[in-house]
Amino acid sequence: MTMQSTTKTRLIKRALPVVILLVGLAISALLLKSPPRAGTAALPDNTRLVDTLQLEKTEHRPVVEVMGQVVAKRQVTLYPQVSGEITQVSSALVPGYTISVDETVIRLDDRDYRIARKRMASNVAKANADLLLEQGQQAIARREYELTGRKLSPADESLVLRQPQLQAAEAALALAEADLAQANLSLERTTIQPPFDGQVVSLNVELGSFVNTSTALLDMVDISEFRLEASVPVEQLQWLTGGDSVSGSPVRVYSPSWPDNQFRQGYVLSVSPSLETGTRMARVLITIPDPLAQKPENRQKPAIRVNDYLRADIQGPTIANVVALPREHLHNGNTVWLMSDNNTLEVRTVTPLFTGQDTVLIANDIASGESIITSALPAPVSGLPLRTREDTTDNHELAGAARSGRKQPL
């Protein structure tokens, strides 16, 4: 390598740092002369984009959602009160058919009972005649006793006047009348009617069967109302009231097999005084009138069957000045995420007045107009900077106006 080329290389190495420094100074001067315009600065990297919901205090009714099984108000098995052969069976005695309280559903052979009634009626007639004869004998005895003019002791006088014979005749008549009443009652019992309007569950006998007082004729259920047995947490009992259709808490009953807009009305009848073993929940009895939808006002509504498993929404009393919050926005059972006035996260502890399946009612810990954060936050820490979609839109508009040289109104 020549001396000249070596000298050039040394000069280049010494000049290169100076050139780089001069270029850097020139770029810095350009940046200082052209500062960024207002509205074009990017938001901090740690600012989270969230969705919010503004809350307002209004009136709400807590709804206690329960599941339960349908049971009959009354379910009975009919037995005959007399023995005999079945001579008639109603065509309505088919499982699922409805029978009324004044309808004859089964008849027994009543010929023996009619004969027995005639026999008892003749006994009554004979006893009545014997009493009349004895009354005549007593009148004759009294006349003869008075003609003697003698005064006997009360015991002897009773015998002379035939008092025992008269009492025996009266007793015989009373016994004959009782036997006749029993014969009439047995004859009536050959005609079997249901004790209430109901639906046939099963028929256990057929025409021609011989039955006695231990023979089960049929099973039936009362169709005036069914009942739903449900379990309710103890802390929810304060919202329920038992009673009749006026005073009991109103209930809406749903089934997954019905259309979405279909439900049946009911009311809370009673709350069990004891808790269930194991679950420590209270047993609630819900009444559902006209479960088979036979009344005109219920004709278009779905029917309810015994042993159905249904959902019931029990409506509590109206509570004023509370915030209704979707339950999914209540975290850890007692905290909510709110956006503060300076657009930061506030993790606030609350005490729910009512906690339902989908809704939480809060009375004192949240004010009207506050905004709750509905977005998921992986690390919710109080003071975390937040922005909403509206804020992002406003920033984009400001940036666009700055680039185009437009003034934004103050």
Image (cartoon, helix red, strand yellow):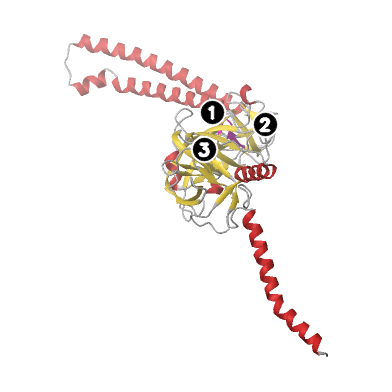
Q: Amino acid at mark 3?
A: Ile
Which residue lies at the image location 68% right of the left edge and 75% below the top edge? 17
Mark 3 secondary-structure assignment: strand
Q: Main secondary structure of the magenta part?
A: strand
Disc sitting over residue 232 in the figure? none
Mark 1 touching mark 3, by CB under 8 A?
no
Residue with the mark numbered 2? 97
Residue 366: x and y in percent read: 45, 43
Q: What residue span does the magenta drawing correspond to?
A: 218-225
94 lies left or right of 268: right
Which residue lies at the image location 58% right of the left edge and 55% below the top edge? 44
Of the numbered discs 3 and 2, the one sitting upstream in the chain is 2
Mark 2 secondary-structure assignment: loop
Residue with the mark numbered 1? 186
Mark 1 secondary-structure assignment: helix
- Is residue 334 something one can see in this rendering? no
Query: Dot 1 surroundings within 10 Å: few (below 14), some, or many (20 or more)?
Result: some
Above or below, comparing residue 271 to residue 278 in the picture: above
Of the numbered discs 2 and 1, the one sitting upstream in the chain is 2
Pick the front one: 25 or 71: 25
Above or below, comparing residue 252 to residue 157 in the picture: below
Disc sitting over residue 314 in the figure? 3
State which quadrant residue 155 falls in.
top left
Of the 4 image quadrants, the one containing the C terminus is top right
- Is residue 260 something one can see in this rendering? yes
Q: CA distance from mark 2 to mark 1?
A: 28 Å
Residue 156: x and y in percent read: 21, 22
Residue 7: x and y in percent read: 76, 85
Mark 3 touching mark 2, by CB under 8 A?
no
Of the numbered discs 1 and 3, the one sitting upstream in the chain is 1
